[in-house]
Image (cartoon, grey):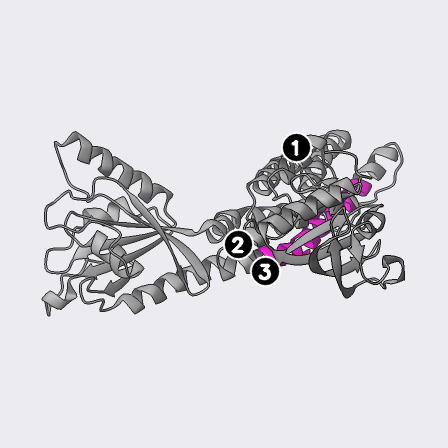
């Protein structure tokens, strides 16, 4: 990243034509830069956090556009610096010319994520909160937005800070044990130390276990629609989407490859994957599709097993989907029979539907929402881990905690136990940025848009 004391500028609204566009200027010279092209109330007379109507003028003094200016004086801004936001009309020309004028006046174009990186450097956000800002912007469902907002407001970070404090307290006890190892003084028994370590381990383990649910809600819960040929899988996908997305035919093996579509149901985004029908085949192309079906089953969080209710229930599908976290049996073509064939034993949630008449689809949607609610229910105190980097750090922390507990059980010297404790502290610190490197920061903030 370029010099942190530069004054930067960028368009913060989405690219393209709109009703308005917002340009953000931040840095020690923000007021001086904007004053060169602002005609309105003098900026040195403006109170912080107030809006004012004025005009942006071109380099020759002619008006470029009417604008609303909002001034945020340091340190009470997002970046902790003097920051000005200019709302102008959304013309591409006006946006482009405004940036040119700001650069001519002494600012430079901001790099990707530089505003949020400055907020992190100013201590207004920790690293986990900064990453949550990007997740709020990218959220594509109410549930994903709610999780990201919780993280951005610091609830997740406070949980990690609590864990780190427990580790610091544990370190203090271990250091005392080292310092006074030759004295007949007992500051804490190994039983107490191990109990504290076990409590820390349990909390880290709970956070790590929430990652699978958190990632599914953030990216869209993967739902594989599986069944034998001609069971009505593609018809069900089309019925759910309200669109003829998949080709429907009575010819077995019509679906040769997986088809993926997203659909928002209630607060959640679901990624539906229509798969090739499962059957024995000598067709090499169809077999590739069937292999991909099995791969989709393995990756899916939810499996909808579609069965023709007029035919004997294919029990082999239960074996092939037994490992999945959630399974729904959709007995299709219920409009064609009064006595549908049911699976034997406890097969899970059973929904009777007709993809042709749309009967039972609301019940199926409710079943999917209930499962998604259970996924959100995995949150411990409202916190779900959604970031792969955080999950890796938690996994590393869990391994070092395990070594620490094993060392205590084996009655290893305190200096060896303390080394594993310090590693745990390090891994947790990388999540919030208490411990970080320029490479980590560059990787994280390069994924942001330029205006954020």
Q: Earlier in the sequence, mark 2 or mark 3?
A: 2
Residue drawn at 22 percent across, 52 percent down: 234
Q: Which mark is residue 139?
A: 2
> At which x and y percent is residue 71?
79, 59
Above or below, 169 against 46 in this view is above
Q: Is residue 153 highlighted in magenta?
A: yes
Q: Is residue 108 highlighted in magenta?
A: no
- The image quadrant of residue 45 is bottom right
Report the magenta residues as a range: 148-173
Is residue 235 in sight in this rendering?
Answer: yes
Q: Describe the element under mark 3 as helix, strand or loop.
A: loop
- The image quadrant of residue 374 is bottom left
Q: Earlier in the sequence, mark 1 or mark 2?
A: 2
User: Which dot, 2 or 3, sits closer to the camera?
Assistant: 2
Q: Describe the element under mark 2 as helix, strand or loop.
A: loop
Q: Earlier in the sequence, mark 1 or mark 3?
A: 3
- For the residue pair 400 and 330, the one nearer the viewer reads as 330
Q: Describe the element under mark 1 as helix, strand or loop.
A: loop
Predominant SS along the magenta part? helix
Residues tagged 1 and 2 counted as in contact (Cβ below 8 A): no
> At which x and y percent is residue 397?
63, 38
Q: Which mark is residue 105?
A: none
Residues tagged 1 and 3 counted as in contact (Cβ below 8 A): no
The residue that mark 3 highlights is 382
* Badge 2 density bin: few <14, some 14–19, many ≥20, Cα 10 Å: many
The residue that mark 1 highlights is 410
Question: In this image, 451 relative to 362: left or right?
Answer: right
Residue drawn at 42 percent across, 52 percent down: 221
Is residue 117 in sight in this rendering?
Answer: no
**How far apart are the two marked residues, 1 and 3, measured between alpha carbons?**
36 Å
> At which x and y percent is residue 429?
71, 41
């Amino acid at each position: 990243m370029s010099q942190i004391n530069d004054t930067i500028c960028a368009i913060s609204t989405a690219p393209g034509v709109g009703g308005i566009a917002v340009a953000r200027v931040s840095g020690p010279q923000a007021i001086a830069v904007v004053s060169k092209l602002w005609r309105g109330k003098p900026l040195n007379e403006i109170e912080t956090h107030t809006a004012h109507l004025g005009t942006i003028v071109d380099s020759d003094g002619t008006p470029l556009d009417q604008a609303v200016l909002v001034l945020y004086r340091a340190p009470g801004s997002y970046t902790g610096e003097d920051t000005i936001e200019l709302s102008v009309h959304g013309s591409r020309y006006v946006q482009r010319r405004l940036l040119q004028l700001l650069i001519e006046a002494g600012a430079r174009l901001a790099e990707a994520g530089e505003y949020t990186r400055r907020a992190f450097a100013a201590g207004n956000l920790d690293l986990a909160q900064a990453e949550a800002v990007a997740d709020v912007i990218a959220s594509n469902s109410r549930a994903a937005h709610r999780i990201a907002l919780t993280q951005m407001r610091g609830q997740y970070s406070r949980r990690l800070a609590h864990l780190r404090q427990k580790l610091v307290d544990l370190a203090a006890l271990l250091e005392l044990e080292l310092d006074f190892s030759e004295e007949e003084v007992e500051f804490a028994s190994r039983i107490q130390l191990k109990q504290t370590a076990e409590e820390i381990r349990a909390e880290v383990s709970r956070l790590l276990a929430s990652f699978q649910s958190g990632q599914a809600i953030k990216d869209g819960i993967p739902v594989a629609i599986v069944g034998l040929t001609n069971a009505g899988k593609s018809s069900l996908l089309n019925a759910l989407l309200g669109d003829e997305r998949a080709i429907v035919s009575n010819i077995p093996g019509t679906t040769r490859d997986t088809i993926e579509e997203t659909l928002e149901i209630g607060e959640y985004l679901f990624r539906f994957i229509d798969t090739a029908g499962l059957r024995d085949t000598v067709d090499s192309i169809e077999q590739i599709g069937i292999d991909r079906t099995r791969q989709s089953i393995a990756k899916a969080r939810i499996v909808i097993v579609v069965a023709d209710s007029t035919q004997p229930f294919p029990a082999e599908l239960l074996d092939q989907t037994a490992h999945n976290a959630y399974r729904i049996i959709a007995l299709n073509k219920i409009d064609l029979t009064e006595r549908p064939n049911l699976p034997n034993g406890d097969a899970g949630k059973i929904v009777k539907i007709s993809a042709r008449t749309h009967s039972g689809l609301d019940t199926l949607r409710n079943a999917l929402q209930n499962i998604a609610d259970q996924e959100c229910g995995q949150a411990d105190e409202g916190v779900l881990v959604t970031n792969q980097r955080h999950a890796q750090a938690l996994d590393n922390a869990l391994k070092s905690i395990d070594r620490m507990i094993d060392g205590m059980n084996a009655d290893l010297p305190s200096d060896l136990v303390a080394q594993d404790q310090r590693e745990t502290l390090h891994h947790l610190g990388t999540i919030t940025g208490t411990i970080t490197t320029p490479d980590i920061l560059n990787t994280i903030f390069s994924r942001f848009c330029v205006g954020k």
